[in-house]
Amino acid sequence: MTRTIQQLFDLTGKTALVTGGSRGLGLQMAHALGEAGARIMLSSRKAEDLEQAVGQLQSCGIDARWIAADCAREEDIRRLADETLERMGAVDILVNNAGAAWGAPAEDFPVAAWDKVMNLNVRGYFILSQHVAKQSMIPRRSGRIINLASIAGLGGNPPEMQTIAYNTSKGAVINFTRALAAEWGHYGINVNAICPGFFPSKMTAGTLKALGEEKLAAHAPLKRLGDDEDLKGLCVLYASAAGKHITGQWLAVDGGVCAVVGG
C-alpha cells in the first residue's frame, strides 16, 4: 500500500551518526533528523561543545548522545564508528559533516594546511563511510550516507577568499558521492551530497566579515543567506524513504547563487 507523505518522511526507529554535529550546520541537521524521529549520535572534537549540543537536542525531546572524536585521525574515526555501533546498534544514516577550511594565497598555501583540510574533508569522509558501511549498512543491505559538500566545490570563489584547499576538497566530496553511490547502490545504500552556500557559522565568520554579509546576500537571487532551518528539509529527504530513489546527487542550498551566470 502506498505510504502517506508523513510516513515517507518518518525516521522513527532509525539511528543517525552526525559528525561535526556540535554546532552550525551539523547541529541543524541533527535537529532535523531527531525531529523526524531518529536517534542521534553526535560527534566533534570537544566534549564540552557536544554536551551543550546534546542537552539542546534532549530539551527538544530528541534521543541524543555524543562521542568526542577527531575525524582527521583514522584511529578516532574507527573508534567513533565502533562505539556508536556498540552503544546504539545499527547505523541507518551517516552524515559526514566535519570539516575545516584555511585561507591563504595559492602560491603561498602551506602544504601542512592543505593536508589538514584534505585529511578531514575527504579522507575522513571515506574512512568513516567505509567502516560504517562494512560494519552496519552492507550486511543489512540498507543505509543512507549524506555528505556535506559546498557550492565552493562547484567552481572558483571570489579571488579574495583564497581557499584553494577547501574548494578542491569539496569538489572531491561531490565526485566521491557519485562514485560511492554507483558502487554501493546494489547494497541498498543511497549516497547524496548537500552543497550549502553562505550560512553564518564559526567557519564562515571571517569570510562574511571580509566580504560583507549584505553584499553576499545581495548576490543571491533570494537576497538572503542561509539560516537555521534551510538544510532541514533536504537532509530529511535524503535520509528518509521519501528519497529512496535518489542517489549520487548533489543539490545546492544557496539562495539561487549557482543559478546566476558567472555566480
Image (cartoon, rainbow, N blue to C red):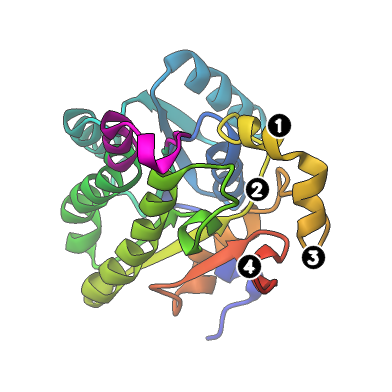
At horizontal 56% and vertical 37% (from top left) the residue drawn is 27
Determine crowd level at label 2: few under 14, some 14-19, many 20+ residues with C-alpha closer than 10 A: many
Given the current orientation, which residue lies at the most extreme front position? Answer: 107
Identify the mark at residue 198; answer none if there is no mark. Answer: 2
Circle 2/circle 1 CB separation < 8 Å: no
Report if residue 206 lies within the magenta region.
no
Query: x, y (%) of residue 59?
Result: 66, 27
Point out residue 10 in the picture as x, y percentages from the top left corner.
57, 61
Amino acid type, callout 3: Pro
Name the N-terminal-most of marks 2 and 3.
2
Q: Would you name the residue on which mark 3 appears?
A: 221
Relative to 54, residue 208 above or below: below
Residue 258: image tag: 4
Q: Is residue 108 magenta?
A: yes
Q: Which mark is residue 209?
A: 1
N-terminal-most mark, 4 or 1: 1
Q: Which residues are magenta?
A: 100-118
The mark that comes first in sequence, 2 or 1, is 2
Q: Amino acid at mark 4?
A: Cys
Which residue is found at the position 21% from the left and 46% from the top? Answer: 127
Q: Is residue 146 above or below residue 61?
A: below
Question: How far separated are the C-alphas under marks 4 and 1?
Answer: 21 Å
Q: Amino acid at mark 2?
A: Phe
